[in-house]
Amino acid sequence: MPDLKYYDIIQKPVVTEKSMADMSDKKYVFYVHINSTKNQIREAVEKMFEGTKVERVNTMIVKGKKRRTRTSTYGRTSDRKKAIIKLTAESREIEIFQGM
């Protein structure tokens, strides 16, 4: 397993209708490094966003989509790991999602 720093774990937020609706329950969705664990994700969120306290982390691996090139060769995009982070009630909200 590679040595991951907290800034390598969180890759980008997932902005969909469902993830925006879950923000009212203090649930935030991020794409994370494929080899990261739940404890590493928890520590990365608490270090990157001041005042946040993570209650629970759920993860899932999203399989890559099938793609075809011009020459009829088939391939796949790479797999991704998605994390749903639930914050505690007294925790601050994550600012990057404000105004979306």
Image (spheres, rainbow, N blue to C red):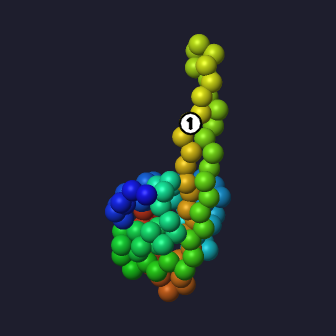
Identify residue for label 1. 77
Q: Is residue 100 left or right of residue 48?
A: right
At horizontal 56% and vertical 71% (from top left) the residue drawn is: 57
Dot 1 amino acid type: Thr
In this rendered view, identify the residue nearer to me: 84 or 72.
Answer: 72
- Image location (x, y in percent) of residue 60: 62, 58
Q: Is residue 47 visible?
A: yes
Q: Nearer the viewer, residue 27 or 61?
A: 61
Quadrant location, the N terminus: bottom left
Helix, strand or loop at disc 1? loop
Instruction: Using the rendered image of the protein, determine whether residue 23 is visible from the camera's viewpoint.
Output: no
From the viewer's perspective, tell me whether residue 6 is left or right of residue 86. Answer: left
Left or right: residue 18 versus residue 12 is: right
* Residue 7 coordinates in the image, percent (x, y): 35, 61
Where in the figure is residue 53, as x and y percent of width and height? 46, 80
Residue occupying the far bottom of the picture: 90
Residue at the spot x=50%, y=86% of the render? 90
The residue nearer to you, when weighing 15 against 47, is 47
- In the image as oriented, which residue stretches furthest toward the front? 1
Residue at x 61% of width, y 74% of height: 25
Q: In this view, does 79 lie above or below 59?
A: above
Q: Residue at x 36, y 72 (%)?
A: 47
Total numbered badges shown on the rendered structure: 1
Q: Quarter of the image holding residue 70?
A: top right
Q: How crowded is mark 1: few (under 14 residues within 10 Å), some or many (20 or more)?
A: few
- Residue 80 position within the rendered picture, expressed as x and y whole percent measured from the top left: 55, 49
For this orientation, the residue located farthest to the top is 71
